[in-house]
Image (spheres, coloured by chain):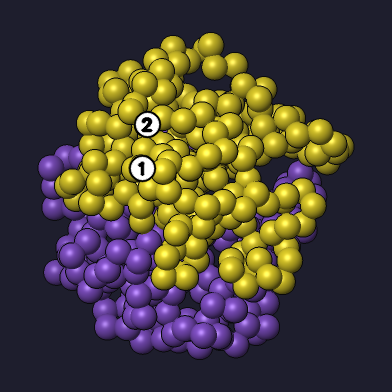
Chain colours: A purple, B yellow
Amino acid sequence: MLHLYDMLSSGNAYKVRLMLWQLGMPFARTEMDILNGATRTPDFLKVNPNGKIPTLVLETGEALPESNAILWYLAEGSRFAPGDRLGRAQALQWMFFEQYSHEPYIAVARFWLHFPGVLDDKRKAQLPDKQRGGYAALDVMERHLARHDFFAGGRYSVADIALYAYTHVAGEGGFDLKRYPKIGAWLERVRSQPGHVPITEEGSPR
Amino acid sequence: MLHLYDMLSSGNAYKVRLMLWQLGMPFARTEMDILNGATRTPDFLKVNPNGKIPTLVLETGEALPESNAILWYLAEGSRFAPGDRLGRAQALQWMFFEQYSHEPYIAVARFWLHFPGVLDDKRKAQLPDKQRGGYAALDVMERHLARHDFFAGGRYSVADIALYAYTHVAGEGGFDLKRYPKIGAWLERVRSQPGHVPITEEGSPR
């Protein structure tokens, strides 16, 4: 059975859980307490030398880290992966945008503001940069969604899953999503997809 | 003809030039002076609303941003893309690692230290964090290369191109590559691939 090294509150881990639910694939999970060093133990570093969750262990025993690479692996050949070359490249374009221009601002601001005891003075000084970068990413998304219902290939795909994970909890990072009506409508479209589960879902499909 | 919005000194842009050379695909290029706002003009923001290079304009007129998504588009179906599902996911794993755990440290430290007039006091204060993050990424690569000649699929691929771009100029970011013998040998293997060109190559294959 697939085994997910997971953390319930992590948007990156949620991407994988959401994909597994929408594909109807059962999985086991280990909740990792990253604030208390669970990803830095010698045992876990043997699984993922980069010491990060999510990491998905396949039935063959291979361990696959990086949330968006896991999404790609799971989605290949399904309705969640665009069927043409340009569509695949555009899905990846938004997934790299997510990891480079979106997650480092929105997810990190959320981590600092939403988890107790995390926001020290050094981070407080960097918060305005995180806010500025996060709003820039939301601006880019809003502009795209003014002309498209989804991010790639003309329909709901892995690119939407990747971007939904931290966008839908951006409020917890101090971002005002009411400024973004197109993003608001897209979040609703994502939530209405068959098999959607919230970030708090701890179970597995059967 | 393919048209690349480019900057010669950018490692992200170099990835695309190197891939085009190794595929033997001719291209035109526009050198963008990002330090003087070339990527922030209304005209360029119409091409890429995220205002970043590299951006590749295809023969159909579609503009594709994000260096690693461009690599994937160009490599599909070629010897530079792994032929199996796990190999593709592992190539993407390293490409997401590159954009999340490698480039934001090594490329940014290089930008601050290598380009005149860029290192202000605020950046100087953040430089130790950049050094620490960059060395952590190099450690992960060294550990992988102790057991593998290349990053994914058992042979030279887009994953190696993505990681080579900023690793081979990490010294310009203040990183001491002599500490990493496996990375040194891998850089040599990458340089010995047919069709390899250096980051300074301004031309196009015919």
| Residue A206 vertical position relative to residue A43 in the rendered view, above or below | below
User: Which residue is at the front of the view, A134 or B95?
Assistant: B95
Tell how many labels.
2
Residue A21 in view in this figure: no
Q: Secondary structure at mark 1?
A: loop
**C-alpha gap between disc 2 and disc 1:** 8 Å
- Marks 2/1 in contact by CB < 8 Å: the verdict is yes
User: Which residue has dot 1 on it?
Assistant: B24
Q: Secondary structure at mark 2?
A: loop
B119 left or right, relative to B43: right
Q: Amino acid at mark 2?
A: Gly
Residue located at (28% from left, 53% from top): B76
Residue located at (34% from left, 80% from top): A155
Give the numbered dot on residue B195: 2
- Quadrant where the C terminus of chain B is found in the figure: top left
A31 left or right, relative to B170: left
A12 left or right, relative to B154: right
Q: Residue A179 appears at what percent x and percent y?
A: 68, 83
